[in-house]
Image (cartoon, rainbow, N blue to C red):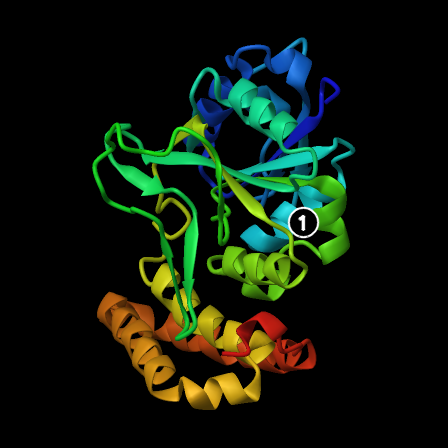
């Protein structure tokens, strides 16, 4: 593999301090100047300038400012579009990399010549608890982070393995493949867009590899801090999008009781997260989003892998 094979894409929204910490951890990575082409920051607040970010003489940092919040999914797509590297590494703005993260990720990629999608070991900010070893999918309309919340132990696999899918918090993918498959679906805005992408990778028989030697640390929850019900709302809405977009009709009917139970759980989480003061903005968002169901329906392509 040639040097400078990675461009990093970081979408951000009003999270400057953690973004700076994330970029510092990238710049401090061992042999980063030889591995990285550039860091592309896509700012959905539209106010970010280079003077506000850590500086590097060896690694270019590029900012794309959006006047409006276009969402995580669209922001990532815009960043990858500017990538000319073999791989694009998508990172949340509250991810901090271990000092040997890039070296270990590239080393694993070298051992899998046809590898197209890679996911590292993601720990919580303390480094003592697992956030994710990848995604597991359930046909009833549910995906979970493998071993989420479990203490870090010495029993983790020492070698990479194939996993069902990868969360978008720290995802390395062949740039051409990401562009060819259409990137993230921007209608998802934020959350569950990684499940949608993983389903499309699965349909195309594109494998995702877990790389335990590449370690990073995730704070999490920054996107929804200012709107407490955002995660619950997007979870409820975007799982409906997944089912409308990808589930064969037969699969829906065969799994209908379980699907309904999961959607009721999503709805309960949503209602529980709402406060009285949130209802005006919640209703406004819900009514505005009605048009998106038509857009999702127009994209409906039942997947053969979901014929269960």
* Secondary structure found at label 1: helix
Residue 84 located left or right of residue 278: right
Residue 260 located left or right of residue 172: left
User: Which of these two is toward me, 167 or 164?
Assistant: 164
Q: Is residue 198 above or below residue 50?
A: below
Residue 158 placement (x, y as % from top left): 39, 28
**Label 1 crowd bin: few (<14), some (14–19), many (20+), radius 10 Å:** many
For the question of whether residue 218 can be seen, the reply is no
**Which quadrant is the N terminus positioned in?**
top right
Question: Circle 1 is placed at which residue position?
Answer: 77
How many numbered discs?
Answer: 1
User: Which of these two is toward me, 71 or 155?
Assistant: 155
Q: Is residue 214 above or below residue 227?
A: above
Residue 156 located left or right of residue 91: left
Residue 273 placement (x, y as % from top left): 26, 66
Q: Which residue appears at 38% of the width and 81% of the height?
A: 259
Q: Is residue 72 above or below residue 280?
A: above
Q: Which residue appears at 68% of the width and 60% of the height?
A: 204
User: Which of these two is toward me, 208 or 100?
Assistant: 208
Residue 194 placement (x, y as % from top left): 52, 55
For the question of whether residue 216 can be seen, the reply is yes
Q: Which residue appears at 69% of the width and 80% of the height?
A: 298
Residue 178 placement (x, y as % from top left): 70, 48
Q: Which residue appears at 27% of the width and 69% of the height?
A: 269
Quadrant of res 301: bottom right
Residue 107 located left or right of residue 83: left
Q: Is residue 253 above or below residue 279?
A: below
User: Which of these two is toward me, 92 or 215?
Assistant: 215
């Amino acid at each position: 593999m040639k040097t400078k094979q990675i461009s990093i894409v970081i979408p951000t929204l009003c999270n400057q301090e953690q973004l700076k910490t994330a970029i510092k951890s990238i710049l401090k990575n061992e042999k980063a100047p030889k591995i990285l082409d550039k860091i592309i920051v896509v700012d959905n607040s539209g106010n970010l300038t280079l003077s506000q970010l850590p500086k590097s003489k060896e690694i270019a940092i590029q900012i794309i400012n959006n006047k409006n919040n276009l969402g995580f999914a669209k922001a990532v797509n815009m960043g990858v579009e500017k990538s000319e590297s073999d791989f694009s590494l998508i990172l949340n703005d509250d991810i901090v990399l271990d000092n040997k993260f890039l070296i270990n990720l590239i080393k694993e990629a070298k051992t899998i010549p046809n590898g197209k999608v890679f996911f590292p070991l993601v720990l919580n900010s303390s480094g003592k608890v697992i956030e994710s070893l990848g995604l597991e999918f359930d046909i009833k309309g549910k995906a979970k982070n493998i071993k989420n919340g479990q203490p870090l132990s010495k029993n983790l696999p020492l070698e990479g393995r194939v996993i069902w899918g990868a969360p978008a918090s720290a995802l390395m993918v062949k740039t051409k493949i990401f562009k060819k498959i259409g990137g993230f679906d921007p209608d998802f805005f934020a959350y569950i867009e990684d499940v949608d992408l993983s389903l499309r990778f699965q349909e195309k028989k594109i494998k995702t590899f877990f790389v335990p030697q590449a370690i990073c640390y995730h704070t999490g929850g920054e996107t929804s801090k200012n709107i407490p019900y955002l995660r619950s709302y997007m979870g409820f809405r975007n799982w409906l999008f997944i089912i409308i977009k990808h589930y064969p009709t037969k699969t829906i009917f065969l799994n209908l009781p379980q699907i309904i139970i999961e959607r009721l759980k999503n709805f309960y989480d949503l209602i529980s997260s709402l406060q009285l003061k949130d209802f005006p903005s919640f209703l406004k968002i819900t009514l505005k989003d009605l048009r998106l169901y038509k857009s999702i329906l127009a994209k409906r392509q039942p997947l053969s892998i979901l014929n269960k």
